[in-house]
Amino acid sequence: MASVKPRVKVPKSASAGEVITIKTLISHPMESGQRKDSDGNPIPRQIINKFTCEFNGQVVFSCDIEPAVSANPYLEFTAKVNEAGTFKFTWVDDDGSVYTEEKEIALN
Amino acid sequence: MTLTRRSMLTLSVGAAIGAVAGMRTSPALATAEDAMAKVKEFAGGAEPATGTITLNAPEIAENGNTVPVSVSVESPMTEDDYVESVAIFADGNPSPDVITFNFTPMSGEASATTRMRLAKTQNVIAVAKTSTGQVFMDKKEVKVTIGGCGG
């Protein structure tokens, strides 16, 4: 889907051991599979069903998403930073597409 | 048959009841029992305790399409004792599942925020499971003015 665009907000730097807040948003219709089109036919379900956040290859946070999550799913969570490195964010779509985004963080 | 004022009233009340009953049957919504069954399944037999977990959701949501909901659990978040996962359920949606957050000790804190859909006024339930096998639950009623699940 061409319109899917992930956006992530991570602080540029943090002190060692600091707990930072990460905000993510991905543009996606999150079609719930409950709606019907004008002819009364059900619109097939198409949602992001999994989100994972990794830091230097280790999973920090993940979630399993159901159709009850709003369109353009927004997620806010925390991560503890002990070293400089890269956050990798992965969204998995019902149709098998995977969207990723990466953000660097430095120690100060 | 002549339509008197009284018979008109009876008829319209009957029609209104019929309409309400019809509306209730069309989108199959989950019930509180379905949601509690999900909670039990998630808890894995443990009896959920109250406290420790805080669920934050608006008391009144004008638009059921995007209802902000956040959850936080008090926990040391160390390797030996951390919150493994928090599940959110809604007992009046077509399906009670909303989202499951999976935390690790690297999360630092067991707190997360998202936005959810609510089909009507209903209870939102959050259940947390810790690595030491404890289960905590919090519940909040959200009044919805406009439903958010289509139909």
Image (cartoon, helix red, strand yellow):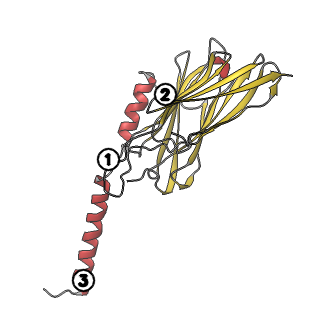
Is residue A105 or residue A60 the one in the foreground? A105
Mark 3 lies on a secondary structure that is helix
Instruction: Pick out the residue farthest to the front.
Output: A2
Which quadrant of the structure image shows residue A12?
Answer: top right
Q: Mark 3 highlights which residue?
A: B6
User: How many C-alpha atoms fall within 10 Å of the one at disc 2: few (<14), some, or many (≥20)?
Assistant: some
Relative image position of residue B16 (x, y in whole percent): 30, 68
Give the camera-side residue of B63 and A107.
A107
Question: Mark 2 = which residue?
Answer: B48
Residue type at mark 1: give it.
Answer: Ala
How far apart are the two marked residues, 2 and 1, measured between alpha carbons? 28 Å
The residue marked by circle 1 belongs to what chain? B
Q: Earlier in the sequence, mark 2 or mark 1?
A: 1
Per the model, the C-alpha gap separating discs 3 and 1 is: 35 Å
For marks 3 and 2, the one nearer the N-term is: 3
Mark 1 — residue?
A: B28
